Amino acid sequence: MIEMKGINKGYLLGEEKLPILKNIDFTVEKGEYVAILGPSGSGKTTLMNILGCMDEMDSGEYFLDGMAIHETGQHALTKVRNEKIGFIFQNYQLIPTYNVMQNIIMPLLMRGMSHQEAQEQCRKTIELLGLEHRINHRPSELSGGQKQRVSIARALVGSPAILLADEPTGALDQSSGRDVLKLFRELNEMGNTIVMITHDLNVAKSARRIVRIVDGRLYENEP
Ligand SMILES: Nc1ncnc2c1ncn2[C@@H]1O[C@H](COP(=O)(O)OP(=O)(O)O)[C@@H](O)[C@H]1O
Ligand SMILES: [Mg+2]
């Protein structure tokens, strides 16, 4: 599902390039649930942005669901992000003026689907996440755990090839965090491929496989 080979990424610091990701090889098979574990500043978000086709790599090859991302232009990548990736963020990134239903169907509307069709297609996802009684609420009327469930519904609604989560429990209390991790396990058991980024070993342990990132290098086992 994901195959990265020799990925390098740096940021310009004045005239010099500061290396951040160093020669990363990373493979994820369909149906896997992988955690990328690393301390603050290790390059997790930089890697997430490349995995999510939101940022370009300096060198290396990245195949996502059979597509050569390193050879794909910006315009086509917008479509790839919309169709192949379900994003879940620490701070939910819901649109505050939209209600739950409107937030969830956003990715479908972006594909050009009609409102009516989108509302029909999202019904199963809304039921799966137990949000039936919340569809008319605004994000500000929901708890953190509920907001994260809405964002997970939005990530799932378009049947993406992978779910990509950056610190999905980072803003939640312990109990809601546990609920989200339990949900991820269930979604994985239903066949969803999940890559979760975290700095917290206890969170990472709920995935089926852990890789570590330290100072921009990726390790399958203990570094
Ligand atoms: N846009 C940027 N310009 C320059 N340096 C950056 C930029 N984004 C991140 N960095 C640096 O890259 C390193 C890795 O950052 P990041 O990927 O956000 O790490 P993490 O998510 O693991 O905390 C940090 O040292 C950070 O300061
Ligand atoms: Mg980060």
Image: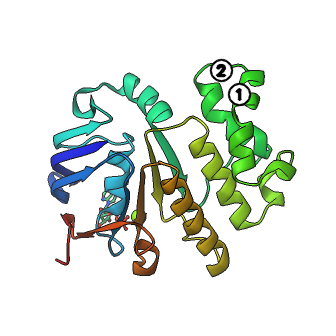
- Which quarter of the figure has residue 95? top right
Quick one: quadrant of the N terminus? top left
The image shows residue 81, relative to residue 96, as above or below, that is: above
Residue at horizontal 66 percent and vertical 34 percent from the top: 106
Give the left or right position of residue 186, taking residue 38 as reference: right
The label on residue 118 is: 1
Mark 1–mark 2 distance (CA, rounded to whole Å): 6 Å
Label 1 environment density (alpha carbons within 10 Å; few <14, some 14–19, many ≥20)? many
Q: What colour-coding does the image apply?
A: rainbow
The answer to which of 37 and 221 lies nearer the viewer is 221
Kind of residue sitting beneath label 1: Ala
Kind of residue sitting beneath label 2: Met
Residue matched to label 2 = 113
Regarding residue 97, the answer to whether it shows in the image is no
Circles 1 and 2: CB atoms closer than 8 Å? yes
Residue at horizontal 62 percent and vertical 19 percent from the top: 112
**Residue 221 at x, y percent in the picture:** 20, 73
Residue at horizontal 34 percent and vertical 62 percent from the top: 44
Label 2 environment density (alpha carbons within 10 Å; few <14, some 14–19, many ≥20)? some
Residue at horizontal 66 percent and vertical 78 percent from the top: 175
- Figure quarter occupied by ligand 1: bottom left
Give the left or right position of residue 200, taking residue 143 as reference: left
User: Is tag 1's residue or tag 2's residue first in the polypeptide sequence?
Assistant: 2
Give the left or right position of residue 147, taking residue 56 as reference: right
